[in-house]
Amino acid sequence: MRPFDPFRSVKAALAALVILSVGITTFLIFVAFHAAIELRVIAIFAVIASLLLTQFVGHGLVGPLDELTVAARAMARGDYARRVRFDRRDELGELGTTFNSMAADLEAVDRHRKELVANVSHELRTPIAALRAVLENVVDGVSDADPETMRTALRQTERLSGLVEHLLDLSRLDNGVVPLHARPFEVWPYLSSVLKDANTAKGPAHARTDVHLHLDVSPPELVGYADIERLRHVVSNLVDNAVKHSPPHGRVTLRARGSEQPQGLVLEVQDEGPGIPECDRDRVFERFGRAATAPHGKDGGTGLGLAIARWAVDLHGGGIRVAESPRGCRMVVTLPGPVREDD
């Protein structure tokens, strides 16, 4: 039975209940004076009519609250899929809508928590298993502790270290304790050093020595404004991803242009890989999010780099997105200049 809901307000429903009760009682008293009926009989009928009316209106008010109570108890037991299903136009209807929205948010948080545990466990297990295999082969005498074997172990150790650093950055992100130290800087020498580090790094993400890195800054004397340490992480991560997804002997281009704002900056990282499907362009910036074309093997990454990169860009007040490109993937980062307060 659907609760009676003729009003758009609980206050209006209660006011109508009082008015109807008083009206019925007044009418019965009026009838009693003209029909010579004893007042106590009229009083009994008035009480009965008021109780029936109160029960009718109370069912419409208490029924949704009972359903909310049952759903809240189920949620307290961990059942975040429970929803309330009643269609009302008053404050109780708004409460039900808010409850369903809260339940959906809690369900998403619980799902993300489970995915976080599963993904972190998977990401840790892969390099640990590889490192253990290398060390077991050395201990058992299957392979010698030569420089190549040690470099393999070092790469797995660096991968573990990178994952831990990403998780620490993620923790700082959630706690909001990372300050921003922005200052002007010369774009060309800064990005040149970032690409030089990418060429000389020894980690597994940079094992591709066949990919050509190209820097294009216009004008050459361009000056930007950012936290150079946070920006280095953003650019390095985008270049790393572009290198990993490039075809053999591919080309990765890092472009820098000025924006309309003073010392504002627009950075682009373009590769020649398979690109990112349009349906995945938002999901790749989520924690542990990967596009459908992303590898899930040994070079699949942690799935945290782009999430942290987006956070670092947001911290600057800028934006990061996957832009349209006829070939490959084109990541665009926009950074505003310094905020100037009006005198």
Image (cartoon, rainbow, N blue to C red):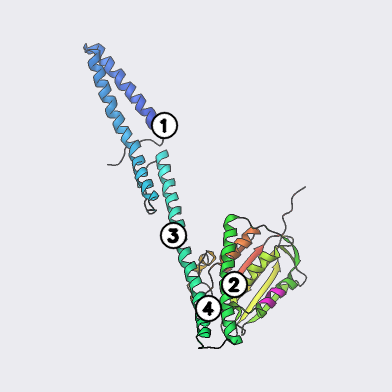
Q: Of the residues tagged 4 and 3, which is closer to the observer?
A: 4
The label nearer to you, 3 versus 1, is: 3
| Left or right position of 284 against 194 | left
Disc marking residue 54: none
Inspect the magenta stretch and tell me whether residue 291 lies in it.
no
Q: Secondary structure at mark 1?
A: helix
| Amino acid marked by disc 1 | Lys
SS at mark 4 in the image: helix
Residue 252: x, y in percent?
A: 63, 78
Q: Is residue 284 left or right of residue 268?
A: left
| First along the sequence among labels 2 and 1 | 1
In the image, which residues are magenta? 193-197
Instruction: Find disc 1 in the rendering and name its residue.
Output: 11
Q: From the image, give the main secondary structure of the stretch colored magenta.
A: helix
Q: Which residue is mark 2?
A: 330
Mark 3 sits on what residue?
A: 111
Q: Residue 210 at x, y = what percent? A: 61, 85
Question: Which mark is first along the chain, 2 or 3?
Answer: 3
Residue 199 visible within the image: yes
